[in-house]
Image (cartoon, rainbow, N blue to C red):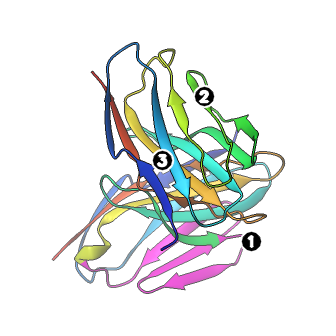
Amino acid sequence: DGGITQSPKYLFRKEGQNVTLSCEQNLNHDAMYWYRQDPGQGLRLIYYSQIVNDFQKGDIAEGYSVSREKKESFPLTVTSAQKNPTAFYLCASSPFREDTQYFGPGTRLTVL
Amino acid sequence: EDQVTQSPEALRLQEGESSSLNCSYTVSGLRGLFWYRQDPGKGPEFLFTLYSAGEEKEKERLKATLTKKESFLHITAPKPEDSATYLCAVRPGGGADGLTFGKGTHLIIQP
């Protein structure tokens, strides 16, 4: 079955630690995105990538980093520089030259 | 600045009671307007993409419409399983690639 997978589903982190969230897709989509969702707020764009080995900052990139070494993978690292990392993180992808984005199931990150 | 406002924030309906959700937007050159459904603890599920004023799309009990300033998601004779948060998003024209989301409408359908 084609789709987007995110792991883990739940992640707990101590303050000062870096953590990496996984996002994989087997849809052969070119573009991939990371969003953050907080209660009472709309989704906000962190980073996006249109092609392998290239990515762009979104609206709230500070404290985050990404890589795009393979077309199907777009991991997100939440660094210790991110001041308020507790949130629901969503990965999305879209086909070449299409506007619709399709979302994965999400990872809930909690900082202890 | 691109902006999306959804209303109401929450809506409680009886099963079979039709209603509409509103999404007002301001964007520099609309490239597309999107509706998603999100269940608690899950990722958004794609429903519709609308591109130009006057466009309409339907899926089961849902119908989305678009004008130059807003979009409506009409729900006809809803069932309890339609309970969810409905998200509206826009994609601006130009070089930006991400979606700008509203805060969503939390819909509850009571049996």
Mark 1 Cα-neighbour bin, 10 Å: few <14, some 14–19, many ≥20: some
In the picture, the quarter occupied by the C terminus of chain B is bottom left
A46 is within the stretch colored magenta: no
Give the mark toward the camera: 1 or 2: 2
What is the CA distance from the residue labelled 2 to the residue labelled 3?
15 Å
> For the residues marked 1 and 2, what is the alpha-carbon distance in whole angstroms?
36 Å
* Residue at screen point 64% across, 63% down: B33
Q: Where is mark 3, residue-wise?
A: A90
- In percent of width and height, residue A109 lies at 36, 34
Across and down, in percent, residue A94 comes to 66, 61
On the image, the x and y values in percent for residue B69 come to 67, 60
Name the outermost residue toward the front. A70
Contact, mark 1 vs mark 3 (Cβ under 8 Å): no
Q: Which chain's residue wears label 1? A: B
Residue A99 location, quadrant: bottom right
* Mark 3 crowdedness (10 Å alpha carbons): few <14, some 14-19, many ≥20: many
B53 in magenta: yes
Q: State which region is magenta.
A: B50-79
* Residue under pointer 1: B52
Q: Is residue B34 above or below residue A91?
A: below
Q: Residue furthest right?
A: B94
Q: Is mark 1 on a helix, strand or loop?
A: loop
Q: In this view, does A30 lie above or below B59?
A: above
Residue wearing tag 2: A65
Q: Residue at x 72, y 70 (%)?
A: B51
Above or below for A97 versus A11: below
Residue B69 visible, this orientation: yes
